[in-house]
Image (tube, rainbow, N blue to C red):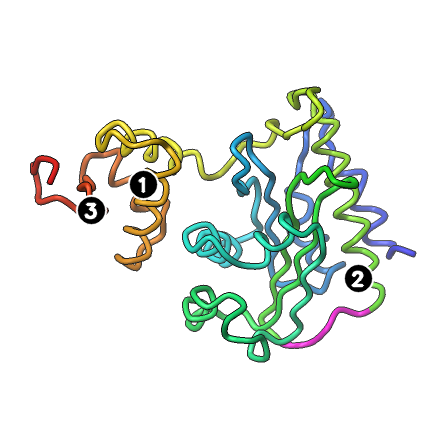
Amino acid sequence: MISALMARTLPLLRSSDGTPDLTVLRGAGERALGADCLAVSVLGSAGERELCWCSDDLARTFDDLEFTLGEGPGHDVVTSGMSVLVPDLARIHADRWPGLTVELGPLPVRALFCFPLAVGAIQVGALTTLRRTRGPLTGAQADDAFVLASALTSLFLDCPDCPDDGTRTPTGPALLRAVVHQATGMVSVQLEVPLPVALVRLRAYAFASGRPIADVSRDILDRVVRLGDNGRELPAGGEKE
């Protein structure tokens, strides 16, 4: 049974034109789930998990780390179709998410709960909730989270811009990582490598430089940064190594 707050929130997820409107989750959704911040991601056509909405900078930073490192609860959820519930991050095994665990050190994230957006074998995306304090979900919060995940799944599958091709990859929500894909395309052309390889190079450079991948991508698009064949930055005005 869901809470009265979640019951009032669910109908507001769909705007008057039928497209998703996730802004209602900021505040109402967070309170219902006992979360400090939320993030919603969907699977893009290339199978990459794409951030389409987050409630604040902490949620965005967390998702950027997952994307850059290629590991974390969101990746596990869309791969396995199973929820990831971590009431105390200090207690997880170091080898579960080795890179993410280290990078999370400065962030005030003490617990996280991630739920699949899926129908059977059809994976749509993930709902991630973060807490600044340790502790498990209550039964009511867990019920609200599963119902919300189901509602978001239906919302994205019903999106008028979603292709009806059996995969039902949602394309309606405005993806927040468009700048990364633009930069990936530029690196692909500059280095004459396939897009997946260019994305790996971009991720590696962002991680090595300790900067958000979106910031690095903007520098690449602005031609402030140019990557060499080895994934390192070329000198200003430099040619390919």
Mark 2 crowd level (few <14, some 14–19, many ≥20, 10 Å Cα): some
Task: From the image, tell me which residue sits under label 2.
Answer: 142
- Position of the N terminus by quadrant: bottom right
Question: From the viewer's perspective, is the residue at label 3 or at label 1 nearer?
Answer: 3
Q: Which SS class for mark 3?
A: loop
Q: CA distance from mark 2 to mark 1?
A: 37 Å
> SS at mark 1?
helix
Q: Amino acid at mark 2?
A: Ala
- In the image, the segment drawn in magenta is 134-138
Q: In the image, is 187 to the left or to the right of 54?
A: left
- The Cα atoms of the two marked residues, 2 and 3, are separated by 46 Å
- Mark 1, residue position: 217
Q: Quadrant of residue 161?
A: top right
Q: Nearer the viewer, residue 55 or 237?
A: 237
Q: Position of residue 72 (x, y in %)?
A: 54, 59
Q: Residue 112: image x %, image y %?
A: 62, 65
N-terminal-most mark, 3 or 1:
1
User: How dense is the environment of label 3, judged by Cα within 10 Å: few (below 14), some, or many (20 and up)?
Assistant: few
Q: Which residue bears the numbered disc 3?
A: 230
Q: Is residue 225 visible?
A: no
The amino acid type, in three-letter code, at marker 1 is: Ser
Residue 86 against residue 15 in the figure, above or below? below
Q: Tell me which label, 2 or 3, sits earlier in the chain.
A: 2
Q: Residue at x 67, y 73 (%)?
A: 87
